[in-house]
Amino acid sequence: SYVLTQPPSVSVAPASTATISCGGDNIGSNSVHWYQQKPGQAPVLVISFDNDRPSGIPERFSGFNSGNTATLTITRVEAGDEADYYCQVWNTRGVFGGGTKLTVL
Amino acid sequence: QVQLVESGGGFVKPGGSLRLSCAASGFMFSDHYMSWIRQAPGKGLEWVSSIITSGDTIYYADSVKGRFTISRDNAMNSLYLQMNSLRTEDTAVYYCATEGGSSSPFDNWGQGTLVTVSS
């Protein structure tokens, strides 16, 4: 079965840039979607189809996907960005990465 | 606005059954693929099942295939998940979510309903 690998945690200072990776075999041939989940809340889609931002998502959120790695980049990180982030693809079945906890120092 | 409200969760013993429901409003339900996704306590997201607009094509995760059945009633704007032969590892919050179609993201989520399987 297809596996997506994310780092368990990423820590950054406020106003800096956070980069969260999502590794998978030839993931660049798939469309990657990213979700943000804050404690006690349902996930929210923040990036679709590698680098599309849904309405209401700040321009600070962007994505890139090529080769064996997709990345979610958050610029000018704010305290409110602290959350778990999950990547997701379709590969005959729905597949989620294990999630990355973003901590804003 | 899009609203998805799950119900039917609760406490059940191993081997038991539950039926989850998801009431949809604020969008054309019959035009959207729908899915169930779950999250075990303190764990990550796990896709469970998806159903296309007509209900004719259905997909399941290997972990639930043969035990869970997804269905929909487009006239009632509702999605269902019949869960049989429940195991302790099925304990999770179950979310319903909309999909735009093949390879599309889960763009709207409900707040989830908790299923606890324990003896």
Image (cartoon, grey):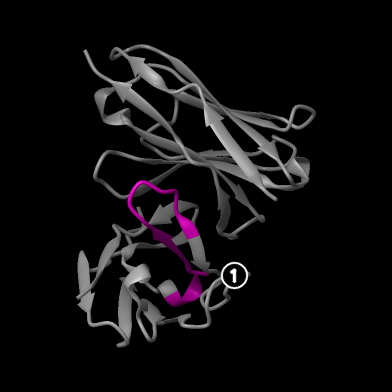
Decide if residue B58 is on the left or right side of residue A97: right
Magenta extent: A28-44
Place of residue B40 in the rendered image (x, y in percent of width and height, measured from the top left) = 30, 39
Place of residue B81 in the rendered image (x, y in percent of width and height, measured from the top left) = 53, 27
Query: What residue lies at 47% left-to-right and 61% top-to-bottom?
Result: A89
- Above or below residue B26? Residue A44 is below
Query: What residue lies at 70% left-to-right and 47% top-to-bottom?
Result: B32
Q: Nearer the viewer, residue A39 or B89?
A: A39
Residue B79 counted in the magenta span: no
Tag 1, which secondary structure? Answer: loop
Q: Nearer the viewer, residue B59 or A54?
A: A54
Image-quadrant location for residue B83: top left
Place of residue B28 in the rendered image (x, y in percent of width and height, measured from the top left) = 78, 45
Q: Nearer the viewer, residue B115 or B103?
A: B115
In the picture of the structure, the residue carrying the numbered disc 1 is A56
Question: Does the rendering let one see residue B41?
Answer: yes
Image-quadrant location for residue A11: bottom left
